[in-house]
Amino acid sequence: MGITRSAALRFGEDAVRARTHLHVSAVRTDGHHLWIGGDETSAVERFSCVNPKHADVYAEHSSYDLTEVLELPGEPARELDIEGLARCGPYLWAVGSHSSERKKPKAHHSDAKVVKRLAAIEPEPSRQVLARIAVEDGVPVRTAAEGHRSAALGEPGLLGLLAEDPHLAPFLGIPGRDNGFHVEGVAALGEPGAERVLLGLRGPVLRGWAVVLRLEPVERNGRLVPSELDGRRRYAKHFLDLDGLGVRDLCPQGEDLLVLAGPSMALDGPARIYRWLGGARPDVPEVVRAEELVHEADLPFGAGDDRAEGLAELPGGELLVVYDSPAPARRPDPNTVLADVVRLA
């Protein structure tokens, strides 16, 4: 049990020049394709497995700008901050962080400039995206030949739905790295067109308990609308006892849900994989106690680098873990970033 080998992600020259290959925050497998999302662009990246029998090299990198297939919030040039990817039938799902941003002080700033930047909080409308993307022949499209259409969550949006929530509303304007509201994982379950969508929150962590949201969006007039779950609410909350950690990604495995967990704030570690027993079933409880969460594995983390951000299942039940801000040892050459392959007991 644990890390068995590395898998190489070979990025194209454009990604290397833009340094977006160093900001990987989401991953999902799709047959012999691998989808990657980053927090510095408005695109999803697709790779192909060089040897499907032994998933250790992913190449043939292609990039697809989601603004070309979706009507998205915010300015077109702004990053979506994609933090989670999921695959369900003919659709790829993507979610942005939805978080506000606090200005980051830099080493050369004066004391007065540091104090000023720490007070500056900017909402980021472009990050407030939850989208279902139609994929045809491995390419995101507005409308597929069989009628599947790309669509994003419409108004009032996720933040609007939560505006009066007793647990989460107080955190909506707080930056994610300050234990504010920050989405970092998505899982799409059920039948295409009738999906249950789970959103894992990096923050807030409430007295040590992490939060997972559940929505059941349906398409109306070209937009996604959360349907009513019980005749009244349009979302549900699940509270997970993750030993004080927040959710960094969600990955279905059979009837269970694998949870990649890490700190809610700007800290280096720990990083762990938990198994939420029965988490992929439709009848999951509101409160998920420690005994329903199996601590499966610990993952490496660095000092300011190697932050585990994405988790995907490979053929044979192995898992692929990708890291944001990869350490130099994960970059054997300018175009390659190494991920970890993990086998659980």
Image (cartoon, rainbow, N blue to C red):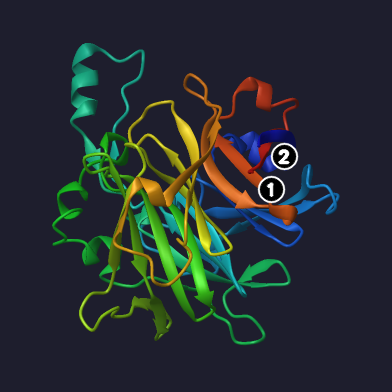
Q: Nearer the viewer, residue 303 or 221?
A: 303
Please give left or right for residue 95 compared with residue 296 in the image: left
Q: Position of residue 229 (x, y in %)?
A: 30, 78
Q: Identify the residue shown where x is 18% and y is 30%.
A: 119
Q: Which residue is mark 1?
A: 318
**Residue in view at x 47 percent, y 22 percent:** 304
Question: Which label belongs to residue 163?
Answer: none
Give the distance between the C-alpha atoms of the residues marked 1 and 2, in whole angstroms. Answer: 29 Å
Locate the N terminus and report the quarter of the image it occupies.
top right
Dot 2 amino acid type:
Glu
> Which badge, 1 or 2, is on the more N-terminal residue?
2
Dot 1: what SS? Answer: loop
Q: Amino acid at mark 1?
A: Glu
Image location (x, y in percent) of residue 173 = 20, 47
Residue under numbered circle 2: 13
Count of numbered tags? 2
